[in-house]
Image: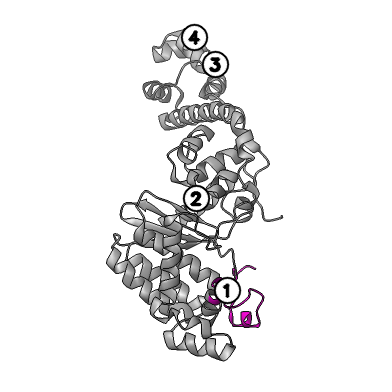
Amino acid sequence: MGNRRYAYTPDYAVAPGATLQETIDSLGMTQRELAVRTGMAPKTINEIIKGKAALTPDTSVLLERVTGVPSRMWNNLETNYREQLAKIADRERLEADLAWMKTIPTKELISRGTIEPTTDKVTLLHSVLKFFGVGSSEQWTQVWMQPEAAYRKSERFEAHPGAVATWLRLGELDAQKIDTKPYDRVRFQKALTTIRSLTIQSPEVFEPRMREAAAEAGVAVVFVPELKKCPISGVARWLTPDKALIQLSLRYKTEDQFWFSFFHEAGHIMNDPKKSVSIDDGNGHGTDEREERANRFAADMMIPAVHASRLQTLTTQPKVTQFAKEIGIAPGIVVGRLQREGVLPWPSPLNSLKRRFTWKDE
């Protein structure tokens, strides 16, 4: 707690006229005398001092000649004053959006260092809107909740739109930092073959390599820890016509679930229209043709159909280990496939072959 910084935003604005009044007072000069010396109307001088009239660049030049105070200082005072007035007006408008902010997991955004902590709700709201890149909750609704938005086709998004949109935005921002070549389907297919060979490696080895291979084919791969009320394992979507995104949460910690989620989302990128968005919970239960196709793609990518006939015979650890070695894939992935097909029960001694992945701070 001692290292936290809290933002302070004043709820008032000081007009440059206040400084002007102090300046002429120190010079023993009246407003009328200032008007005579500058050639300006007394009424205009009075309105500037009261903050009713703007202190223009032309006026700042005249004030420099008469008071000796540089014109840039008068200009800066005026700019800061107008900016603060705009912020105060914006703050009043934003207060109406505070109810919407309750749907956003702000505490988790703060704990992850995404937004700064503050005790002021309107300041926090400003940070949340800035995080989403929108001007108000109304614009947020237009971006994320419009009827044609692909996200809305997901039951998970409909249940908790604020949490899911936050998780999606985190991935979007991470993906923007990744340089990718224009998407090429053939290159991505080759990249997936390369990535499949990495399943036997540790995360320290496979993570940077899979990111690099995918980026060369036009796909950004990002890992974002799941949020509360956001039971999502992976998402596949297009950021631009030439850049796709695969976002994974590591919701299920075992390697078979992780790799199935990755190749499932890769299947969506390979085969679905670019305007579609896939939001998956990782249970592998397809509810439509696209999901079933992505499931088949993931299954065949990890264990090609030519080897599928042997799965029914893999009931012991030595057999699973040998089979995995022959086809060049992690044994834990084979165990997961056997469980999905009912060859092995989910509570199985062979679960010991599955590696568990965790975030570094866990």
Which is more foreground, mark 2 or mark 1?
Answer: 1
The quadrant where residue 350 appears: bottom right
Mark 4 — residue?
32
35 lies above or below 3: above
Q: CA distance from mark 4 to mark 1?
A: 94 Å
Dot 1 or dot 3: first in sequence order is 3
Dot 4 or dot 1: first in sequence order is 4
Dot 3 or dot 4: first in sequence order is 4
Which residues are drawn in magenta? 338-362
Mark 1 — residue?
342
Pointer 4: residues within 10 angstroms few (<14), some, or many (20+)? some
Pointer 1: residues within 10 angstroms few (<14), some, or many (20+)? few
User: At label 1, which amino acid type do we have?
Assistant: Gly
Pointer 3: residues within 10 angstroms few (<14), some, or many (20+)? some
Quick one: 83 or 24, which is closer to the camera? 83
Which is more foreground, mark 1 or mark 3?
Answer: 1
Contact, CB < 8 Å: mark 3 with mark 2?
Answer: no
User: At label 4, which amino acid type do we have?
Assistant: Arg
Which is more foreground, mark 2 or mark 4?
Answer: 2
Q: CA distance from mark 3 to mark 4?
A: 15 Å
Q: CA distance from mark 2 to mark 4?
A: 58 Å
240 lies above or below 98: below
Mark 3 — residue?
50
The quadrant where residue 298 appears: bottom left
Q: Secondary structure at mark 1?
A: loop
Q: Residue at x 56, y 57 (%)?
A: 232
